[in-house]
Amino acid sequence: MSYGQGGQGQPPWDPWKPGSQQPQWGGQNTDRTPDWAALAEASESRNKRRRLLFIGGGALATIAVGAAVAVAVVSANGNGQASNQPSNLPATANIPSDTTTPAPSFEPTSAPPPLDPKDFIASAKKDTAPLSPDILFPGTTLTMGDRVYRKGPTADTRNCASAAKATLPAVLTKNDCTRLMRVTYTKDGVAVTVGVAVFDTEAQAAKAKGQADKKSIIASLAGNGVKAFCDSAVCRSTTNSYGRYAYFTLAGFTNGKNVTAKDTKVFATGDDLGEFAFRQIRRRGEAQASAAANE
């Protein structure tokens, strides 16, 4: 019996096949001990091939997953454009809002009403600012538009009736006039005297105005370069009131000529001075209202 390798013509040992499939050599028993070195080398070769397959397969799987995610994003947005806006949310108008929280409320506030200037010249109790002819009619001239009047004499009396004529003295006395101030202005041969009568209340001044008639005239005031006027000639007169003041005008020619309806220059002079008297009385109320508001 020989213990060497198999004789020629015997099929070789295949390490990749199980033992039952290996060729039988020359009547030898199939449970012969295998070549362990060859088996180990074959196993190591198989492991290397498997690792290479796993690495290559993992890379392909990663590429496949990335491609699937990219396709999913593009398909969701359409037209190959990415979008940051959700497509399955309801419109803003359909999203319910929280109506359970009450809106904050605030107490209504308002600024106090402004002080009425007329209130301060409606009675002697509130009308306490200094008063004189030069305060009401300051300066030496008066400009109204393009017309300039020269200021003449002034007068101030507590005896109201003494500075009035015809039916006016009785009216002033009946309504308890406390003071009468006068001033005269001249321009181009026309003179006008303005008289401001002072009462304790607005009601008294309004009543005096209502009781005055066409014969209720203020006494003209001459002096300081102004000759006497309207002593016997026909002149134009006006009567008004504002607050606790009644104010009068008497306008005429300085040469004693009678005033007629055609003498518009006389009428314009009387209107200018009457308007100026009203403005000065109103400004008196405004000044006192402003001072009270700033206290």
Image (cartoon, rainbow, N blue to C red):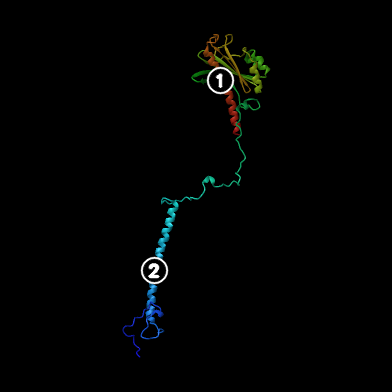
The outermost residue toward the bottom is 1
What x and y, as percent, mark residue 149?
A: 52, 18
Q: Would you say residue 293 is visible in this rendering?
A: yes
Relative depth, front residue between 45 and 239: 45
Q: Quadrant of the C terminus?
A: top right
Separation of residues labelled 1 and 2 (CA atoms): 115 Å
Q: Would you say residue 134 is visible in this rendering?
A: no
Residue where numbered disc 2 is placed: 53
Relative depth, front residue between 201 and 100: 100
Against 16, residue 251 (above or below) is above
Q: Residues within 10 Å of mark 2 (few under 14, many from 20)?
A: few
Residue where numbered disc 1 is placed: 275
What x and y, as percent, mark residue 105?
A: 61, 42
Q: Of the residues shown, which amino acid type is indicated by label 1? A: Glu
Against 205, residue 89 (above or below) is below
Lower sequence index among marks 1 and 2:
2
Q: Residues within 10 Å of mark 1 (few under 14, many from 20)?
A: few
Q: Of the residues shown, which amino acid type is indicated by label 2? A: Leu
What x and y, as percent, mark residue 18?
A: 40, 78
Q: Quadrant of residue 232?
A: top right
The outermost residue toward the front is 27
What x and y, as percent, mark residue 60?
A: 39, 63
Label 2 secondary element: helix
Q: Quadrant of residue 64?
A: bottom left
Front tag of 1 and 2:
2
Q: At 57% from the left edge and 13% from the top edge, which residue is drawn?
A: 236
Residue 52 relative to residue 217: left or right: left
Circle number at residue 187: none
Q: At 41% from the left edge and 63% from the top edge, which residue is drawn?
A: 61
Label 1 secondary element: helix
Q: Quadrant of the N terminus?
A: bottom left
Q: Quadrant of residue 46?
A: bottom left
